Image (tube, rainbow, N blue to C red):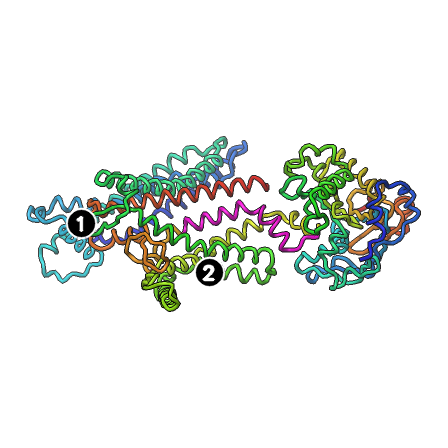
Amino acid sequence: MLQQLGQLPMGWLLTALLLFVMSAGFSIGRIRAERYSLSSSGKFHSRPNYHGYYVAMWGLAPALILALAYLLLAEPVARELLIRELPAAFHKLPKAELVSYLDAVSAVSTHGTYDGSDRVFTAVTHRYLELSGSLKITTLATILLSAILGVMFARSHVSPDFRARQRVESGAELFLFLCAAIAIATTVGIVASLFYESIRFFSQVPVTDFLFGTRWNAQTNAEFGAVPLFFGTFMIALIAMFVAAPVGLFAAIYLSEYASRKTRSYVKPLLEVLAGIPTVVYGFFALLVVAPGVRSIALWVNATLIDIGLANGPVLAAQPTSALAAGLVMGIMVIPFVSSLSDDVINAVPQTLRDAAFAMGATKSETIKQVILPAALPGIVASLLLAVSRAIGETMIVVMAAGQRARISLDPSTDLTTITVQIVALLTGETEFDSPKTLSAFALGLVLFLVTLCFNLIALRVVQRYREKYE
Amino acid sequence: MDTVGPAKTDLALTGEGADKTQALTYPRIDCRNVSVYYDDKQAVFDVSLAIHDRAVTALIGPSGCGKSTFLRCLNRMNDTIEGAKVTGDIFMEGENINSPDVDPVLLRSRVGMVFQKPNPFPKSIYDNIAYGPRIHGMVDSREDLDAVVEKSLRRAGLWEEVKDRLTQPGTSLSGGQQQRLCIARAIAVRPEVILMDEPCSALDPIATARIEELIDELRKRYCIVIVTHSMQQAARVSQRTAFFHLGNLVEMGDTDQIFTNPRERRTEDYITGRFG
């Protein structure tokens, strides 16, 4: 019996139950309010629908909380109960083995295909099904009970004077607030874990060594001087901005000032498609097309310099992956960030200013240079800052096209590595979570987070200032 | 280019005798069969009228009657609106300014414009005035520029109020001062014609009165065309009035005649407040 209950499709059941509670609560509240209004002569404060919503809210809220709790806790609780009942032999197993054994048990019990060759396994599976079956039936019963209690409680409030509308409004507000709070809480959680792990790292490696050391060799030698990574990140972001800032800005000027409505309606979405290309696609574009191109140009420069006698040996490193390749492609990637935002701020410059300049006999380019760009400058700066922070945090392109070697070199044809590349390298493959090697990834992540946070904050401030001026 | 009237009077230090000009007015701008289309929608229908020099011509009519659109034909501002098309001939000094051969940039230095909402550039008061003379290369030295700025501000009746704070941003002035700043900015490029598109609609009555005084003063030197919603304003400041309705020119004549003895029934209805 319990075993069969263990196979109940809880997802569907819970959904159905919640829908039922909701509609039943609504009808109960509404019907009661209507009855009242028919029998009593006084005027109802809230319309019957609001009483319905109010009762449904009280039925749904506890049911929803319980259902969420079930979804989060059911599996671990069932496992814990099962482990307690297992014979002593199981308790001697290493933890990882026990976990994978239990994984197999829960997989078989949900899909139900096992030939029964191992009798112990079959027995454990049956017991697991029984346990989860009783959990399921208890949960359903509890949810139903709490919903009934909630509905009864709310129903007793229905009366002509009851301000159901206000209650429903504040209930809706609470719900929306909770949604916002989830987003904020997640961010706070991530930042907190970054800080926590970083502190563990800095208890093993001094902060100054990390921030000012110039040798990075986390994989083999446990050298954690992050300056070469900062340099690589900075260098590649700089190259990217050399591409993105002029191209993006001029594209924005074209779009907002020169393009006809029709051209604009085609070009702007097309430009924004650039932002929708997965960065891994940019990555292999960088690796397979741009990097070889950069290399052959570097080789040509080397040969030419030697030919004309300006150099004795190769001047440029001409590596198969290079800072220039990664930077160029990253620049292309962030063009839409610059162009789209700049276009918005240029469009936000009041039309009256353009009219004023044109009516003075200014040409289009004079108007743009002397009136529109100065007025839009703060917004443009903000868009550039946001693009920089995007470039610094970008991972996939640099992983594929920048290289792995940590070094400080101004030669753009050499390979460099960045913060993000090293984080990926440190956390992929076999990792133990308490060695300084792994923890250093969190410290790098923290630096990255703080830097991009600063850029974003400055950009937001600049944009706010600018808004104040024109509204 | 032939710049007979205004350039010379502009250089004259006083406008003495200017009060008599009303009798001496002659057409400065001659519009023939002007129509304006926004995409496929026609906004102005076949308007022909003459605008006299040294006089204020008021364009009146209910909202959407095409008066502002017509005004914007006179300095080719409709060129800046996508999808707008102007047909017909507009002769200024014998030259058809609606012809594609005419450079709107040069034209706009001869025909200044003041807008509904004061729109000073986000620059200093001085730079606002100096903007036009600078881009048109009208001055050679800083002293000349200073002189132009001072003269323009004096003519706009703003000099005494701002002479000690020329470096402050133009946007720091009050609404009425900003509008006079815009008028001074327009004057600074020595235009022959000044167009005003409801210049007082964003201002309080006192600032409005100052602007009206100023318009009356400027009429001695310039040809002024003003679009206004206020019939009292048209009656106060203009010598000639044109009444527009639904994109058509209904009637044009001396302001006194339009307001006391309109020929057209629609004009009378509008002036007496029966519609609009």
Chief secondary structure of the magenta span?
A: helix
- Three-letter amino acid code at disc 1? Glu
Placement of the N terminus of chain B among the 4 image quadrants:
bottom right
Residue B222 location (% of width, % of height): 82, 47
Query: What segment carries the magenta color?
Result: A361-390
Is B98 in front, or is A179? Answer: B98
Q: Is residue A161 magenta?
A: no
Tell me if A71 is positioned left or right of B18 in this view: left
Tell me if B119 is positioned left or right of B242 in this view: left
Tell me if A75 is positioned left or right of A32 in this view: left
Number of the label disc, if any, that sits on residue A286: none
With respect to residue A118, does B257 lie above or below?
A: above
With respect to residue A107, does A200 lie above or below?
A: above
The image quarter containing residue A104 is bottom left
Dot 2 corresponds to which residue? A273
Q: Residues within 10 Å of mark 2 (few under 14, many from 20)?
A: few
Residue B199 location (% of width, % of height): 74, 43
Residue A105 location (% of width, % of height): 17, 54
Is B130 in front, or is A146? Answer: B130
Answer yes or no: is residue B128 visible: yes
Mark 1 vs 2, N-terminal side: 1
Q: Residues within 10 Å of mark 1 (few under 14, many from 20)?
A: many
Q: Nearer the viewer, mark 1 or mark 2?
A: 2
Dot 1 corresponds to which residue? A130
With respect to residue A410, does A62 lie above or below?
A: above
Answer yes or no: is residue A125 visible: no
Task: Write down the chain letter for disc 2.
Answer: A
Q: Is residue A369 magenta?
A: yes
Q: Residue at left 78%, top 45%?
A: B228
Name the secondary structure under disc 1. helix
- Three-letter amino acid code at disc 2? Val
Q: Residue at left 72%, top 46%?
A: B115
